[in-house]
Amino acid sequence: MHPFDEAIRLQAAGPATPDVFTGVSSPAYWNMVGPFGGTTTAIALQAVLQHPALLGEPLSITVNFAAAVGPGEFRLVARPLRTNRSTQHWFIEMTQADAEGGQSLLMSATAVTAVRRKTWGQSDSPMPAVPLPQDCSPAGYPDSLAWTQRYDMRVARGDLPRLMDGSGEDSLSRLWLRDNPARPLDFAALSAMADAFYPRIWLRRARLVPAGTVSVTVYFHAGAAELARSGQGYLLGQAQAQTFQQGFFDQAVQLWNEAGALLATSHQIVYFKE
Amino acid sequence: MHPFDEAIRLQAAGPATPDVFTGVSSPAYWNMVGPFGGTTTAIALQAVLQHPALLGEPLSITVNFAAAVGPGEFRLVARPLRTNRSTQHWFIEMTQADAEGGQSLLMSATAVTAVRRKTWGQSDSPMPAVPLPQDCSPAGYPDSLAWTQRYDMRVARGDLPRLMDGSGEDSLSRLWLRDNPARPLDFAALSAMADAFYPRIWLRRARLVPAGTVSVTVYFHAGAAELARSGQGYLLGQAQAQTFQQGFFDQAVQLWNEAGALLATSHQIVYFKE
């Protein structure tokens, strides 16, 4: 089984409680103090996708990270709040057992799933021109982070600065990425990749300050069939911040497939120190 | 009382149920089939701001619109899900009585409030150069929409096309806006203004197709003191889409005050027909 499928594998609690799932934190995607946040987003989405009442496909998901996910088992509750003719509204919570035997909230999320229809279409965000993946350098992450080994990342610009010397000038990164080992693209993988960009402040300041995502939103602009057509190819990801103020900054992301289709856009608000 | 304060006025149900509030839909902000969505966002935020357990100030809010809000009374439940040292996570639901005497879900939302701290800061999104408000034309909305009369909007570019003749070329609008009558800026007003841009597809296509926001997220980049310093001045708002696909498009918004501070950024995913 691919490590990503293992990371997002959920066990349904049973037909009497269709909203409840359990899973196990993946050491293969470990970040500094918990699993890579992208897997947490993908897990929230996966609960929706596995829910027997699901209508349509993912349109948007917003994940709020309330506490670090620990090792071991976690619990998810994914509730369909309202089902319309072509949209469905979801609330998702992730918890883990605490020392007192209760459940402690780690993450809350909302999602909207929807039935896509054939309409007029137009993309006004063409993929930026960058060198081919084989002509870009592998991302310069330390080997000590497990999750970065789970992605094949080829950086066209905005790699993690080698010298954290305060010399940063902008916050723009462009890089090719795909699962490592390669894996056919689907909504869960795409939602995780939307979070696969290190905190923009490290680039903007060329300083390694403490930082962590507080809330992330992903909009999906393609259906399952188009994601499947992207296969195991690379996505081109672009990430950039607009402003850094009083302990928080934003981070905007676009993800195109190799054919140049904009598959997802994403935004997050990130905590930083100093 | 200012019509905006009336529109977001909430009655706490009482000390035994601190999460529960009621309010009344505002005819003064009526849009086509319900109140202007910006007031719904502001109402969700207002419930958090009035909650006795509130920690800090708004950092982010995501509102999912599940059904049109009708006239008359509505009910809000705003639950603090988890309170950390400097952040607090919220879930908010808005309902109205249905024909069977139950409550029907109209809107679900999550929000994060946070304590802002003095840190290094930098804005990389300077306010675009546009003519002064007095040198811009009032927005060309039909008088039949109540909510558009509640804003003083001066358009620098990207006004609602006069001829809906399919001649559109881009989706970029820049306009000055403030409450009408003027009102000191606060978080609730700012959250409403983030949604005060007509659907981008009307501009991109120069065609008036059915469209409505499904989900909107607002990130706040300033504290209450800075909002207060903006006073009753105009904000410069910018709105633009990235892509239109299979019945949905995105819309990104920035809001600066007259001094050029980026106070909020916002994103939404919008349904459209045809």
Image (spheres, coloured by chain):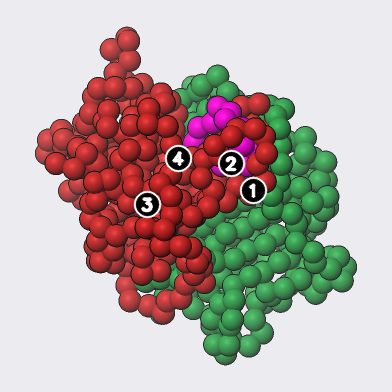
Chain colours: A green, B red
Q: Is residue B79 magenta?
A: no
* Same-chain check, marks 3 and 4: yes
Q: Residue at coordinates 55% horizontally, 27% vertically from top-left?
A: B210
Q: Chain of mark 2?
A: B
Mark toward the start of the polypeptide (3 vs 4):
4
**Mark 1 residue type:** Asp
Instruction: Identify the element where label 4 is drawn.
Output: loop
**Mark 4 residue type:** Gly
**Mark 3 residue type:** Leu
**Mark 2 residue type:** Leu
Q: Is residue B211 magenta?
A: yes
Residue B59, horizontal then vertical, whole percent: 37, 57
Q: Chain of mark 1?
A: B
Q: Chain of mark 3?
A: B
Residue A26, horizontal then vertical, whole percent: 61, 55
**Neighbours of disc 3 within 10 Å: few (<14), some (14-19), many (20+):** many
State the extent of the magenta-drawn residues as a range.
B200-214
Q: Which mark is residue B203?
A: 2
Q: Is residue B157 visible?
A: yes
Judging depth in this view, the residue of A19 and B193 nearest the camera is B193
Q: Residue at coordinates 27% horizontally, 32% vertically from top-left?
A: B28
The answer to whether mark 2 and mark 3 are in CB contact below 8 A is no
Mark toward the start of the polypeptide (1 vs 2):
1
Q: Which mark is residue B162?
A: none
Query: What residue is disc 1 on?
Result: B170
User: Which quarter of the picture shows residue B257?
Assistant: bottom left
Q: Which mark is residue B140?
A: 4
Distance from disc 4 to disc 1, alpha carbons, whole Å, reads 18 Å
Q: Is residue B173 left or right of residue B146?
A: right
